[in-house]
Amino acid sequence: MIGTVLVANRGEIARRVMRTCREMGIGTVAVYSGADADAPHVREADSAVRLPGDAPADSYLRGDAIVAAALAAGADAVHPGYGFLSENAEFAAAVLAAGLVWIGPPPRVVAAMGSKPRAKRLMAQAGVPVLDGTGAAAPLLVKASAGGGGRGMRIVRELADLEAQLAAARAEAQAAFGDGEVFVEPYVEDGRHVEVQILADAHGTVWTLGTRDCSVQRRHQKVIEETPAPGLRDLTERHLLEYADAAARAVGYVGAGTVEFLVGADGSAYFLEMNTRLQVEHPVTELVTGLDLVREQIRIAEGRRLPERPPVPHGHAVEARLYAEDPAHEWRPGTGVLHRFALPAGPGLRVDSGVADGSVIGVHYDAMLAKVAAYADTREEALRLLAYALRRAVLHGPVTNRDLLVRVLGDPRFVAGGVPTSYLEGLPPAPAPDGGALRLAALAAALADAAGRHPAGGWRNVPSQPQVKRFRAADGGEYEARYRLTRDGLAADGHPRVALVSSAPDRVVLDVGGVRREFAVARYGEAVFVDSAAGAVALTAVPRFPPPVGRTAPGSLLAPMPGTVVRVAGVAVGDRVTAGQPLLWLEAMKMEHRVTAPADGTLTALHAEPGRQVEVGAVLAVVSAAAAESAQA
């Protein structure tokens, strides 16, 4: 019997594993980096061990330090979670060699599935269909042999671009996984990403727990997942379950895992990879089956047998990954303090989060704040419930992808089911912000500010100059709230049918055309967040006398986020560059972000080299159009 588990991970998955351990009467040990010293998973563990360094390479990827931590803390088992070392066969072997229980598949299985080309060969031998890139014509897909998450993946539509894309994919894979091996396979247009959850014990029983659709992706990384996969043909679904069973038996799988497939528009299915760990999206399977997959992992690691047959799934579950990132600016990750984090609770809703009020979102780790899942009898009801929960979430801090998620959940094409992995690329741009809603939010923010500064809430019995407060919205637009508060009530410019019901520093109630509307207002420095049933609005108070700002040279390319320079294109100072030409790549939160020339010109300065860490706003390069014109003359 396992007595104490060290969770070799962080964030929401560490908390998720610890929750089940507590329910089973099992002690927990957390490991943490310097950046995570006050993280929720550290506070919730029975004991915790500090790992060296802040960056993943110095902490959560240090297998030797984690094994030593387990022994020092008296743990007798290790759960790897997902990511980091969860699919590292050497780490799994080191855990076992130290006399600890490994809560995962055998190291030989992890090793066999760790190389995608090798895994495909094994699956082909087992009769599972695979995509063969030998002699294939464009379009092609370049993929990293090791790792996942879309790193090292490139779509090649013209064979003339293949060599350049291979080089770029190798460089990214080497930086991400320490392994630059890549391979090529045919790219299936309009393909869907569908996977099967498997669970197997050491006594020969294999469960296939239904299908999950993970086709809503950005940069080849999943954003929304659901089970069962909607709109699959009965034959296709049966084949997927049969193939997953054959894959598990072919490698002697033990534990929880996932077999991923690419499903073509004609219903044909091809093996993509086997994830030898718990998946991020496992909650949706738990919601429809009633299983606790972490509990089952632990029981299997203890040598227990699974029942002969799995539970029959019921209903529909859908999960959205809530990220601190800006979809409108190439998914740029957000950093800073998450002042307030709260989501609705209730029947059918589940939140797995790695953050809490006051958490600092840094640059070292994945930008995911939480997984929000909804369960209902039907898909339509589950989609509606999840969209409602996201709309009502209180998120005061870095920008998130919340609005995009809500938009997808209500998009007719997605609601119809069966969208391909290219779906987000074809999603129309977000509609322009509702100016009326923004002006109303600005008025509520101004009234809350006045209530905080004046005991009487700013009411005046004599005529006076109007109160004026200006705010800047996320899109850069400025909104002015100009109003008077007299004994006759609120008189606000541009709001003839708005009356003030009550105001306090944190809450304003307005009567808008006969409809009572309540606004929750929170301020952190100059940042103001206004939440209401109509939606959430983030504003920045504009000071009456803005401070002077430093000037940078025209054409300066500033770091959009703190991060690390991972690659510099083959350019040098004095080179002519064209608008959109990639100059360098920054890595932050496990994603690469390309920095391109803003216009045609000459590169007159380059302040970047691989490995350099930069802060937001740092000058990376300067492209001078004037220099280009001089050169042409």
Image: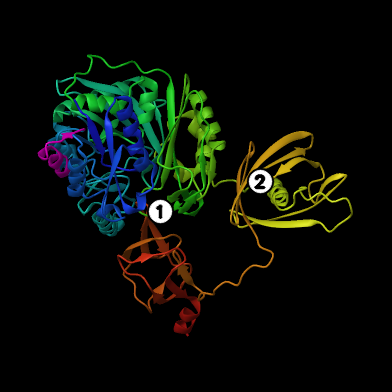
Which residues are the magenta region?
A: 90-103
- Circles 2 and 1: CB distance less than 8 Å? no
**Would you name the residue on which mark 1 appears?**
362
Give the amino acid at mark 2.
Asp
| Residue 54 seen anywhere in this rendered image of the structure | yes
The answer to which of 184 and 105 lies nearer the viewer is 105
Q: CA distance from mark 2 to mark 1?
A: 31 Å
Look at the picture and state if 612 lies above or below 52.
below
**Dot label at residue 387:** none
Label 1 secondary element:
loop
Give the residue at mark 2: 434
Q: Can you say which quadrant of the picture contains the N terminus? A: top left
Residue at x 24%, y 49% (from the top left corner): 61
For the view shown, which residue lies furthest in the top direction? Answer: 308
Mark 2 or mark 1, which has the lower sequence index?
1
With 441 as the anchor, is 59 left or right in this view? left
Q: Quadrant of residue 29?
A: top left
Give the residue displayed 14% in from the left and 31% down from the top.
251
| Neighbour tally class for label 1: few under 14, some 14-19, many 20 plus, Cα within 10 Å | some
Tag 2 secondary structure: loop
Q: Is residue 239 visible?
A: no
Question: Which is more toward the observer, 182 or 551?
Answer: 551
**Where residue 227 sits in the image (x, y, percent)?**
39, 26
The answer to whether residue 392 is magenta is no
